[in-house]
Amino acid sequence: QVQLVESGGGLVQPGGSLRLSCAASGTTFSTNIKRWYRQAPGKEREFVAAMLSDGGTWYADSVKGRFTISRDNAKKTMYLQMNSLKPNDTAVYYCNLGNNWGQGTQVTVSS
């Protein structure tokens, strides 16, 4: 059974940093496109970042230059390093691998 387990969310002040992790099991990891999405209260889920199997990346304009997606194939884990966080980055963040989703982790940016 496929499982994606997220961790690393929390409360951070504006300008701070967090690193989210998403550990996969029960599925092929290295060849799948890895994606992060987020959903703020009252809004639709939106794309944040993605990484191809060859390491190519792309980002939503709203996070470009502040967020970095990465992976460790040996650990079957993907990461989202988030720097210079803003209040409007507040959302539940979800990892995605193929047709599978993590449970979500809350990120709150507030002073």
Image: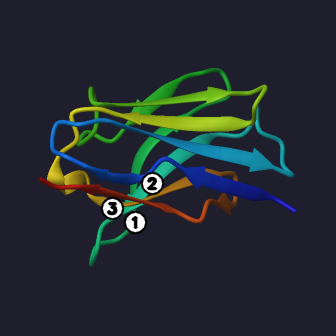
Amino acid beneath label 1: Arg
Is residue 12 placed above or below 66 in the rendered structure?
below
Q: Quadrant of the rendered structure where residue 72 is?
A: top right
Is residue 100 placed above or below 24 in the rendered structure?
below
Residue in view at x 81 percent, y 49 percent: 25
Q: How far apart are marks 1 and 3 (CA)?
A: 9 Å
Residue 89's spot in the image, x, y percent?
A: 25, 52
- Which element is circle 2 on? strand
Lower sequence index among marks 2 and 1: 2
Amino acid beneath label 2: Tyr
Residue in view at x 75 percent, y 31 percent: 75
* Disc number placed over residue 79 in the picture, else none: none
Q: Distance between the residues labelled 2 and 1?
A: 7 Å
Farthest residue in the bottom direction? 42
Residue where numbered disc 2 is placed:
37
CB contact under 8 Å: marks 2 and 1: yes
Is 108 left or right of 23, judged from the image as shown?
left
Q: Could you say which is closer to the camera, residue 34 or residue 22?
A: 22
Is residue 23 placed above or below 106 in the rendered structure?
above
Lower sequence index among marks 3 and 2: 2
CB contact under 8 Å: marks 3 and 2: no
Residue where numbered disc 3 is placed:
91
Residue 21's spot in the image, x, y percent?
A: 56, 42
- Which element is circle 1 on? loop
Lower sequence index among marks 1 and 3: 1
Residue where numbered disc 1 is placed:
45
